[in-house]
Amino acid sequence: MAEPTRNEHVALRVKLLEQLLLEQGLIADGEVDAVLDDFLATAMPLNGARLVAKAWLDADFARQLVADGSRVAAGLGMRVAPLGQPEVQLRVVANTDAVHNVLVCTLCSCYPLRLLGTPPTWYKSLEYRSRIVRDPRATLAEFGLHLGPDVDIQVWDSTSHVRYMVLPQRPEGTDGLSEAELIPLIRRDALLGVAEVPATVGGRA
Ligand code: FE
């Protein structure tokens, strides 16, 4: 019999783990499916992009979003925590000409999954988690984001209780665009703080 591939190994381990959790009565039958269904249907970077586009178009909404991100997201039917888990606090941190914000989880890989979808591999890497704290300017430059010496960089460390999202600056040349036209410009990396928002789809910031 052929050796199982790495993917087959992982699939087998997941299956066994699920079986054990069921046998021990720690989860009910169908519970994992329900969480996965909900995740696949609702967790996507479109949620974060919607919040940002609305904030750009409405200064009052932007103020509320920064003041109480959880409440504003909930008002649009967006949860931050996975289904079946207690809600976590959402803190939205706004970029300005003077301050650039960037996100990390130094301990593990906490991430606003429901607002940004699945995290990129680099976000979970030990290299990113240590280097973005030690030398954020050089690390961001490696992402292609070159910030001047006059810009302060704030690194926000996620925890099990607080998830962050960056409110990027609206690019010049996008005046007059509607929410639907702005949303495709707002990609995951800008919401994590490792990129700026380009003025055109596929364009450079
Ligand atoms: Fe974490």
Image (cartoon, rainbow, N blue to C red):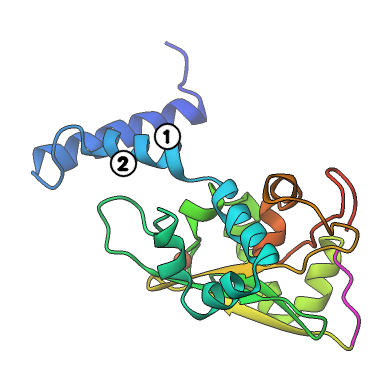
The image quarter containing residue 157 is bottom right
**Few, some or many C-alpha atoms within 10 Å of disc 1 (few <14, some 14-19, many ≥20)?**
few
Q: Residue 46: within the magenta?
A: no
Q: Secondary structure at mark 1?
A: helix
**Quadrant into which the N terminus falls:** top left
Which mark, residue 35? 2
Q: Nearer the viewer, mark 2 or mark 1?
A: 2
Taking the spot 60% from the left edge, 53% from the top edge, the residue there is: 50
Where residue 79 appears, as percent x and y from the top left, is: 39, 56
- Image height check: is 95 above or below 115? below
Where residue 144 appears, as percent x and y from the top left, is: 87, 61
The image quarter containing residue 155 is bottom right
**Residue assigned mark 1:** 10
Position of 186 with respect to 201 (left or right) is left
Taking the spot 64% from the left edge, 67% from the top edge, the residue there is: 58
Where residue 119 appears, as percent x and y from the top left, is: 57, 51
**Few, some or many C-alpha atoms within 10 Å of disc 2 (few <14, some 14-19, many ≥20)?**
some
Position of 117 with respect to 160 (left or right) is right
